[in-house]
Amino acid sequence: MAGVCVPWGAEACRLHFPIRRELPVSFALPKSSSMIVNDNLSAFLEILPRDLRHRLLNDPRRNQLVEVIMDLGRPPEARYLGERGGQYLRNIEVSMEELEDAQELVGEFGADNRAGIEGTLHRISAIRNRKGFIVGLTCRVGRAVSGHIDMLYDLLHYGKSILFVGRPGVGKTTVLREMARVLSDEFQKRVVIIDTSNEIGGDGDIPHSAIGGARRMQVPKPSLQHKVMIEAVENHMPQVIIVDEIGTEAEALACRSIAERGVMLIGTAHGEQLQNIIKNPTLSDLIGGIETVTLGDEEARARRSQKSILERKAPPTFYFLIEMRERDYWIAHQTEKSVDMLLRGRNPMVEVRKRDEEFKVVIERWKSYDGQGI
């Protein structure tokens, strides 16, 4: 079968063959591409009331447990991966005493109302009343999953910055954690993680082994994340910076500053699709920023467009953007080209990366993308 010339990456042209295929043979798969999960569930269950602990420990679906909700005056609820809604664990309502017992077993809650269990990746988030007392807990199971990296292992060889977007719970932080390990241990890069909520490296001063040899910088307050990002570059000479939940203009500007210094940046942002970032005035700088341009009459006629159009005003901070639609269904963009096509009202060409029935990664290259489905 004849090859097809496509402009992906730094080269002017590379040949790719069948549309549906496994990872390119020019790239070696990671040393361990099978999915391995380490959730340290016993430590998570210790913070729960005794009856809930016993029930979940004997639950055949415990490996799919996502989080346990404990709200004062309501029955506790468990939520599972792949299931809509939750399931009550008992009829008896959660008491203030049970909430206080759970608080004593977790670390101190930060300014973002998040805490953790030392030595684990579990995250506990608090809901407070107007007087500041905790009246609800969201206890999320943190899992170290190795094997996700084969979904984008080939892209790491480019050494380009990558931005992940996706709804909460789709696995963005899990992917960041494994990328930190692979880039530091296999690619031998100097990796620094900006861990604002201790969600990537876990609670405590010693980071979780899931991040490999990557270093971790903690952030005293969420509002200081952008300053710690710049501090990491200026003080610790990283080749790679990893940051979760880019959400403010200051953080977007810090990302651009880091990228312009030649540092590879791996990050996540709020949104489900590339269009969400384009339309978000706070985060649009991550994909180059958007400005209104007024065309002359001849240019407007040549383009068959209105005189006032939207254009990208600068190179994007992130060379690649990956929409994580599901844990095993991703859409990969070459950011600059996709943004320009979308602003012109045209559908860009993308890569669909997913797993087949045998759990192998399959890439469908250059499918037309309309922002909703493929």
Image (tube, rainbow, N blue to C red):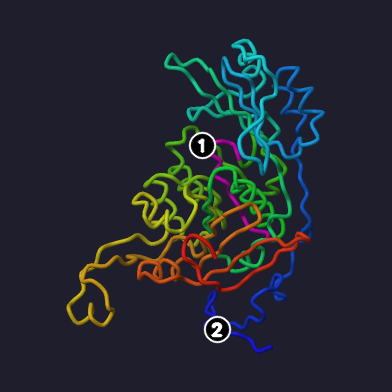
Residue 364 shown left or right of residue 12 in the figure: right
The image quadrant where one finds the N terminus is: bottom right
**Is residue 221 visible from the viewing direction of this image?**
yes
Instruction: Give the mark, 2 or 1, whose residue is nearer the N terminus.
Output: 2
Q: Give whichever of 55, 50 is nearer the camera.
A: 55
Which residue in the rendered view is the most extreme toward the left?
Answer: 297
- Could you tell me which secondary element the residue under label 2 belongs to? loop
**Quadrant housing residue 101:** top right
Residue 35 shown left or right of residue 159 in the figure: right
- Which x, y percent locates residue 7? 52, 79
Q: Is residue 12 above or below residue 134?
A: below
| Label 2 to label 1: alpha-carbon separation | 43 Å
Q: Which residue sits at x=66%, y=61%?
A: 354
Which residue in the rendered view is the most extreme toward the bottom?
Answer: 2
Q: Is residue 299 above or below residue 168?
A: below
Please name the residue that numbered disc 2 is placed on.
13
Q: Is residue 359 above or below residue 49?
A: below
- Which x, y percent locates residue 59? 79, 31
| Badge 1 density bin: few <14, some 14–19, many ≥20, Cα 10 Å | some
Which residue range is magenta in the image? 187-199
Task: Please say whether residue 192 is one of the residues in the magenta stretch.
Answer: yes
Name the mark on residue 219.
1
Q: Is residue 355 above or below residue 47?
A: below
Three-letter residue code for mark 1: Val
Residue 217 shown left or right of residue 202 in the figure: left
